[in-house]
């Protein structure tokens, strides 16, 4: 469907964790492609496996307790899951980079921002010490941090939450990876900074043809930034397709519920915000049939007996949905 | 002096006056203080029991610092923090201790705020044990109830923070704050790590806690839709100062400050496209060297000559009864 060839081809990816409560399958048989000119959104409820999917694309899932239980991740033609461990550091940062959901855990508290950014630039782009510092300052400016030169000498704790997040974004962008996995990169940002950062993503993508996977729960951001969206529930894809089509006509009851529960600025505030009733089932105790059945308003008896497979909806619409009774 | 019981209804629960928090910036060979970051600069507001003040503003404008200073997790450089009539800014750490139970913080970064070596059950019990709340058996029930309130299953009790997703961890943080039945919760971006459907559940929960338990919230968020849903009052911060403060309904229906107007116009919408949005131009100024005059003047679409050299002060618009105040020379 996409014009450019896929940079990333994920097939039947399955990731499990060993926990005290038994094996938890965090990612369950997930397949998708991302082309070089695409920004693809990964959305879904907390705990549905977005971060673990993202981490897998850098082979960063902690092993143990995690385990790649199956599938393949082809990045620029090579299967990451088949590569020897020694080959990974060179790929991370250069071929695929990640912006982490929690910036404090990714920044080293004992080094200044400037030192950390310059290290990455020297390692991946072979810049000299002074060039790396100048480039680091330019990247901070690009993500709209005031006083970039002085900020380079700050330690992570001296920055506000949103600034730390922007530093992470600047670091990831500075290496110009082929694929950028951005895990909730703008959730800590206010609307104006967010708009600037998203504009920077778009610019980067056009200039360097970086493919971007944007993990977010902000459907407004998805609508504006992503060409395609993948909706996950309980470790599996339940719907995927072009963003505009998905938002105009959500077919999976879960996608529809998500769209309805988005808090929006309204003329009058509602007494209660609409929510999807119930909660995500425990990963250790998943229902046998459709995993959304207990919360679904369109549930039928067959939904409880078998799991609906992810299938194209047909009629020339490039949407796939895993539901027996779609809208 | 007679100390009034909580919620005696004489005056606000929290009355913040002229609060300032500055951070020294060191430099040079001698590591001297060469400048000050004015993270919070002359902020005043009041908060009644069981109501919520939503605080919005750009990244780095001082929201978290304000929240932490109010709780005295940071020293105030100047100003008063009257909590139930007592100025917390003047209390020693020992004198503060009894007040701590009445004020709780929900953090922006749930990962950094939960101990990695404690199970969820231990984390939720800790404040109950620390403040001697209930009997050992009732504490167990209380922990189960707290999990239920935030929508987590009792199966998670023996799990550690790293075994959770970001959103699940944030719910543990909220449950921990609720454990001691506080009067005031400073919630610093409590739902920005949550996906939309859980976000809505938590926001409905916060509304319920306000009404049913009379908890007051200082609710920090950059998400205007989220703030609208929970707030009675809204304060808009820019570079350490409140530039607009008023009843939520008024601020949303008739925003007065050009910055507030720009923020509301910049909200990404599910129905929208980037072209529909009006974006602010220009750099966010540095809190180290705040510009002269109105701090917003370099980005303001309605800037006038006076804005470049005279700092506007908060004043009433729509008459004193409306409680809607704006710091802008247009008014
Ligand atoms: N290190 C780990 N050990 C055990 N279980 C884990 C681990 N990391 C993740 N999980 C489990 O895997 C599932 C998916 O988690 P993941 O972090 O991918 O969720 P997410 O979709 O990113 O959620 P959020 O929106 O809250 O960040 C969750 O049920 C989580 O509890
Ligand atoms: N410990 C510290 N030392 C020095 N400066 C600090 C410290 N903490 C915060 N600051 C500075 O104070 C200003 C306000 O930061 P604060 O964290 O309050 O912003 P915020 O409004 O919460 O932003 P965000 O939305 O990004 O979380 C920033 O310029 C920040 O760099
Ligand atoms: S005071 Fe002037 S510069 Fe500041 S917001 Fe008002 S009009 Fe704009
Ligand atoms: Mg995540
Ligand atoms: Mg903050």
Image (cartoon, grey):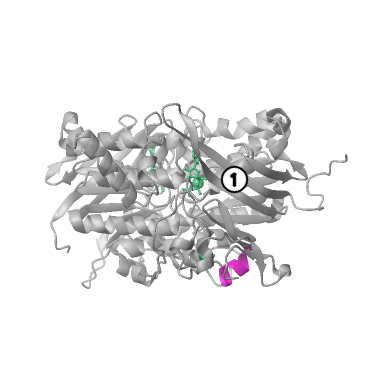
Ligand 2 neighbours mark 1 (CB distance < 8 Å): yes
Q: Is residue B142 visible?
A: yes
Whole-percent x and y of residue A44? 39, 54
Q: Is residue A55 above or below residue B305?
A: above
Could you tell me which residue is drawn at 61 percent across and 41 percent down? B69
Could you tell me which residue is drawn at 18 percent across and 35 percent down? A90
- Residue B249 forms part of the magenta stretch: yes
Q: Nearer the viewer, residue A92 or A197?
A: A197
- Residue ranking furthest to the right: B1
Quarter of the C terminus of chain A within the rendering: bottom left
Which image quarter: residue A292? bottom left
Q: Secondary structure at mark 1?
A: helix
Whole-percent x and y of residue B42? 62, 50
Q: Nearer the viewer, residue A53 or A293?
A: A53
Q: Is residue A324 visible?
A: no
Which image quarter: residue B316? bottom right
Q: Is residue A271 above or below residue B77?
A: below
Q: Which residues are magenta?
A: B246-256
- The residue that mark 1 highlights is B67
Please give left or right for residue B313 compared with residue B24 in the image. right
Tell me which chain the residue with mark 1 is part of.
B
């Amino acid at each position: 469907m996409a014009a450019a060839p896929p940079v990333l081809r994920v097939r039947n990816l399955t990731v499990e964790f060993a926990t005290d409560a038994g094996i938890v399958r965090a990612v369950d048989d997930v397949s998708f492609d991302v082309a070089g000119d695409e920004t693809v959104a990964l959305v879904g409820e907390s705990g549905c496996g977005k971060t673990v999917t993202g981490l897998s694309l850098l082979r960063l899932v902690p092993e143990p307790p995690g385990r790649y239980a199956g599938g393949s991740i082809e990045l620029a033609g090579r299967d990451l899951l088949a590569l020897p461990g020694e080959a990974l550091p060179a790929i991370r940062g250069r071929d695929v980079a990640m912006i982490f959901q929690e910036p404090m855990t990714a920044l080293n508290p004992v080094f200044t921002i400037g030192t950390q950014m310059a290290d990455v630039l020297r390692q991946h782009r072979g810049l000299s010490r002074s060039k790396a510092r100048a480039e680091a300052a330019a990247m901070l400016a690009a993500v709209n941090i005031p006083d970039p030169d002085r900020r380079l000498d700050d330690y992570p704790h001296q920055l506000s939450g949103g600034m730390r997040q922007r530093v992470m974004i600047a670091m990831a962008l500075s290496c110009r990876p082929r694929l950028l996995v951005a895990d909730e990169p703008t959730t800590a940002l206010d609307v104006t900074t967010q708009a600037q950062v998203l504009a920077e993503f778009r610019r980067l993508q056009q200039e360097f043809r970086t493919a971007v996977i944007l993990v977010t729960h902000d459907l407004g951001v998805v609508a504006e930034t992503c060409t395609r969206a993948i909706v996950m529930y309980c470790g599996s894809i339940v719907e995927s397709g072009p963003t505009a089509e998905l938002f105009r006509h959500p077919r999976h009851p879960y996608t529809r519920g998500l769209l309805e529960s988005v808090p929006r600025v309204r003329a009058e505030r509602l007494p209660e915000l609409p929510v999807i009733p119930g909660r995500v089932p425990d990963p250790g105790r998943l229902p046998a049939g459709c995993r959304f059945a207990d919360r679904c308003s369109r549930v039928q008896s067959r939904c409880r007996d078998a799991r609906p497979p992810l299938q194209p909806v047909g009629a020339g619409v490039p949407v796939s949905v895993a539901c027996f009774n779609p809208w | 002096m007679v100390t009034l019981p909580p919620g005696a209804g004489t005056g606000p629960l929290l009355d913040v006056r002229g609060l300032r928090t500055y951070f020294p910036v060191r430099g040079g060979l001698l590591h001297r203080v060469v400048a000050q970051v004015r993270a919070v600069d002359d902020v005043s507001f009041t908060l009644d029991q069981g109501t919520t003040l939503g605080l919005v503003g750009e990244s780095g404008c001082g929201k978290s610092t304000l929240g932490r200073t109010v709780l005295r997790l940071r020293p105030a450089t100047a100003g008063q923090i009257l909590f139930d009539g007592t100025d917390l800014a003047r209390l020693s750490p020992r004198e503060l201790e009894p007040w701590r139970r009445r004020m709780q913080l929900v953090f922006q970064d749930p990962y950094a705020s939960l101990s990695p070596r404690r199970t969820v059950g231990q984390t939720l019990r800790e404040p109950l044990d620390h403040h001697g709340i209930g009997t050992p058996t009732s504490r167990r029930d209380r922990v189960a109830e707290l999990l239920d309130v935030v929508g987590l299953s009792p199966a998670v009790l023996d799990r550690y923070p790293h075994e959770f997703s970001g959103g699940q961890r944030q719910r543990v943080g909220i449950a921990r704050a609720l454990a001691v039945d506080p009067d005031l919760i400073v919630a610093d971006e409590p739902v920005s790590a949550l996906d939309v459907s859980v976000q809505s559940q938590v926001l409905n929960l916060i509304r319920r806690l306000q009404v049913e338990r009379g908890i007051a919230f200082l609710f920090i968020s950059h998400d205007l839709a989220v703030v609208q849903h929970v707030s009675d009052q809204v304060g808009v911060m820019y570079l350490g100062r409140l530039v607009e403060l008023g009843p939520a309904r008024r601020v949303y229906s008739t925003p007065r400050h050009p910055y507030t107007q720009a923020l509301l116009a910049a909200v990404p919408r599910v129905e929208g496209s980037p072209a529909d949005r009006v974006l602010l131009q220009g750099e966010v100024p540095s809190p180290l060297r705040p510009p002269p005059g109105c701090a917003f003047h370099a980005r303001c679409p309605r800037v006038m000559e006076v804005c470049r050299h005279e700092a506007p002060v908060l004043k009433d618009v729509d008459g004193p009864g409306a409680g809607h105040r704006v710091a802008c020379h247009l008014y």
